[in-house]
Image: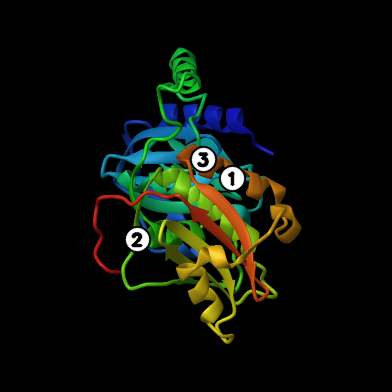
Amino acid sequence: MPEGDTVYLAAKRLDAAFGGRALTSSDFRIPALATATMTGERIEQVRAYGKHLLFRFDNSWTLHTHFRMDGTWHLYRSGERWRGGPGHQIRIVLSTEHAVAVGYRLHDVALLPTDREEELIGHLGPDILDDDWHLEAALERLAAIAEGDETLVNTEPVGVHDIARQAWISVDTGDTRLVTRDATDRILEANKARLRELFEHLFRLVVDDETVPAVVVGVTDDGFCLTQYDPEADTEAVDALETEPDATERVASHSAVLDGADDVGAVERIADMHGWSVDIVEDNGQVAVVCRGVADGERALPGI
């Protein structure tokens, strides 16, 4: 399984071979990018971020790949025989006049504007292998947090429904549907990357492919809630949860209702960073997660 140092070294080699050079051909062998081409575009740099690999082009687009368990990039001279595996495992081929990069068994392949990279890596912490990461600065920041001079997260106005939808597409939710209630999005003061990470953990906790047809994200007077929901059942329970969350029955132990101790712990940790509280509640057999104490943001968003 490739680890961060493997991806880092791969990025260094690819950057040395492709950085500052234009592609003479590009071949994307996945359905989502079957008609895409970056032929003729110049690669500014190849950078690793954790186990993510980013090819940044001078036309302000980025090619993103992830190694996961078995992905790899192989670098060859032009005309050299490829030896990374059978042809059906090849996902991407990028060529310059003198070099060819062949991506085998790559995952999470995406071609997106460079200014949207945060959608794919914004939920990650700092990459300690990155050239811009400095140990001294990190220690100074930790010291400031410990002394109470700095908050744990930087916040901005964030739309609940918008960030929930972004998190939804990054989690395996099977046939379960996402339902966002209310005609307009609720703007909260939060760290955007951490809020998306929180929703990802919540979706993993409450989604059950066999028993949960839908998950509802709604808002309360001082926060938001996420509910297991059967569209064919009576909607009064969900309505009551949003209008009177304190009337529902709190569960003494979160793990007693929801499997996934790591996800529960991550949700509580992110909530604590923001000064929020998290409750797991039950109403008429429906399990819900309620986040309270969330401040409203100042920016207004148009209706979604």
Specify the quadrant of the image occupied by residue 59.
Answer: top left
Q: Residue at x 40, y 50 (%)?
A: 26
Q: What is the number of the mark on residue 268? A: 1
- Horizontally, residue 96 falls left or right of residue 211, namely left
Q: Amino acid at mark 2?
A: Arg
Q: Is residue 75 visible?
A: yes
Determine which of the numbered discs, if any, sits on residue 64 in the image: none
Question: Mark 1 or mark 2: which comes first in sequence?
Answer: 2
Which element type, helix, strand or loop, lies under badge 1? helix
Q: What amino acid is found at the position of numbered circle 3 in the picture?
A: His
On the rendered image, what quadrant is the C terminus found in? Answer: bottom left
**Separation of marks 3 and 1 at Cα, in angstroms:** 26 Å
Q: CA distance from mark 2 to mark 3?
A: 31 Å
Q: Could you tell me residue 14's position as x and y percent?
A: 47, 32
Report crowding for label 3: few under 14, some 14 to 19, many 20 or more residues within 10 A (C-alpha): many
Observer-nearest of 251 and 163: 251
User: From the viewer's perspective, is 251 left or right of 28?
Assistant: right
